[in-house]
Amino acid sequence: MDNSKSREALLQEIEFLRKRINELEENQAKREKHLDEAYRNEAILRAILDNASYVIYVKNREGQFMLVNRPFEALVNLSKNEIIGKTAHDIFPADMAELYFSSDLKVLESRTPLEIEEQVLLEDGPHLFLSYKFPLLDATGEPYAMCDMSADVTEKKRTEEALQRSEEQFRQAQKMDAVGRLAGGVAHDFNNVLTAINGYCELLLETVPEEDEIHDDIGEIKRAAEQATMITRQLLILSRKEQLELKLVKLNDVVCEMFQMMKRLIGEDIEVLTSFESDLPSIYADSGRVQQVILNLVLNARDAMPNGGKLTIETNKVELEDDYTLDHLFVKPGHYVMLGVSDNGHGMDQETQSHIFEPFFTTKGQSKGTGLGLSTVYSIVKQFEGTIWVYSEPGVGTSFKIYLPVAQSEMEQPATSIRPSAAVHGTETVLVVEDEIIVLQLIQQVLKMYGYTVLEANTVEEAIRLSKQYSGQIDLLLSDMIMPRLSGPELREQVIKQRPAIKTLFMSGYTDLAIINQGLIQETSAYIEKPFSPAALARKVRSILDA
């Protein structure tokens, strides 16, 4: 009996254990299934993250990276294991890391998403990223981490800016073309009228005795008609319908032939200074039209200096690189001859500069100008497939630079475009001072692209403050020549008191000779003319630092 009960109890125990084992096996199978699903889901998530076109990462509240995708690893050139647990300060330059940390903290504290543009300095230069940051909340609603999804919009931004500049240039070209067509039609009809006026005046002068009072009146009418004829000729130039006979022209010869006439026209109170490049290549042009360009620019400079001053005329040979022509819609890269005409007159503000090439626009008053001088210059330069550039500062002066393509028969073998290379890279610190924000941003991007540390100042006061407060070494002061309150050389004197070993490079829209002639600097070895290409700026900075 006891044995029977013991046997029954043992069987029950075995059955209980069997069921328990089955339950454990079923639970284990479920766990393994769930684990497989978790592994599979994690693999799917990782594949999505790593193959996304965005840079994605997650940081905790202390700013440490918790998760990064493969594009982020490629961006910073580090592996995931080298990134996890680190902060932005361990990976990026201090100033950039501080900006990233600030925006991350803003997201965590506000518990709201943030869309922001952030700059990242990579091996090939600065890149602009559009970042979308949002907080990750726990069950209680508290943020425990922050996620960032960023897209590189550098090329898109550059394309948009280039497109905007091209559209503006295209609209200006369309406007000038429309005005030119209108002017040509008006000039054609008006010339018919003037032909009749001049003809009848000639007939009357032949028949009316010279001692008659009417004879002089008819002479005045004829002279007025002749002046009107000159204006219609300018209008015809605007229309660009004249058939020009282009020949090989030496620009230096044309300027020299006009020199004595120019001195008589401008008066004795204006000093004329010249600098002609030797062995200047020829251009295809009409020498008469070139003379007209020079004459109009010289007369324009004279009118800008009513109390006398200095007029600088220069010629030079230059190469316009891809960096320049990208921002100028109708300009081709290549070899050019440059004609520079600069004065130290009253100058122009930005609003005036935006209209100076428009027909009939003048600042001289109704009785002192037709407003056709500079528009005529513009049209002639375009006829010769050239380009014109103006730089001016109110109260300081104006500089016109005309670039005319070198005749193909004298063209040298085109040089290959200079790209960033180790020869012009550097690690020094440059203090850039420029009152034009758009130029300041461009220079900052260029120098960072070449490896330099850049301190930016939009005013001379900010530059002096940075020079005082910056704890590290500043190797170069790169400053615009003409700024509000202090000039570039005056700023240099202030900075040298704090940093005697600092080197200086000045920049301006004036030519180097015009800068010397105006007494702004004594020598031009540390000077670069605007407009300059990024490559030219990098070469000049490197040469100054290595000197």
Image: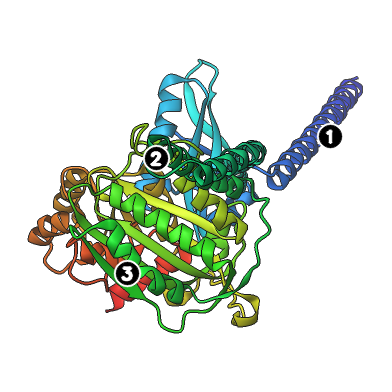
Q: Quadrant of residue 477?
A: bottom left
In which quadrant will I find the N terminus?
top right
- Looking at marks 3 and 1 on the same chain, the residue that comes earlier in the sequence is marked by 1
Q: Nearer the viewer, residue 27 or 8?
A: 27
- Looking at marks 3 and 2 on the same chain, the residue that comes earlier in the sequence is marked by 2
Q: Circle 1 sits in a helix, a strand or a loop, which is it?
A: helix
How many numbered circles are shown? 3
Q: Which kind of residue does numbered mark 3 sit on?
A: Gln
Q: Which marked residue is nearer to the observer: mark 3 or mark 1?
A: 3
Q: Circle 2 sits in a helix, a strand or a loop, which is it?
A: helix
In which quadrant will I find the C terminus?
bottom left
The numbered mark at residue 460 is none
The numbered mark at residue 260 is 3
Residue 7 placement, left or right of 311 = right
Residue 163, placed above or below residue 2:
below
Q: Which kind of residue does numbered mark 2 sit on?
A: Asp
Q: Residues within 10 Å of mark 2 (few under 14, many from 20)?
A: some
Q: Nearer the viewer, residue 267 or 487?
A: 267
Q: Which kind of residue does numbered mark 1 sit on?
A: Ala
Q: Position of residue 217 (x, y in %)?
A: 41, 36
Q: Which marked residue is nearer to the observer: mark 3 or mark 2?
A: 2
Residue 368 placement, left or right of 535 = left
Discs 3, 2 touching: Cβ within 8 Å: no
Query: Which residue position is annotated with label 2?
Result: 216
Q: CA distance from mark 3 to mark 2?
A: 33 Å
Q: Nearer the viewer, residue 167 or 543?
A: 167
Q: CA distance from mark 3 to mark 1?
A: 104 Å
Q: Which marked residue is nearer to the observer: mark 1 or mark 2?
A: 2
Query: Which residue position is annotated with label 1?
Result: 29
- The answer, for residue 427, to whether it is visible in the render is no
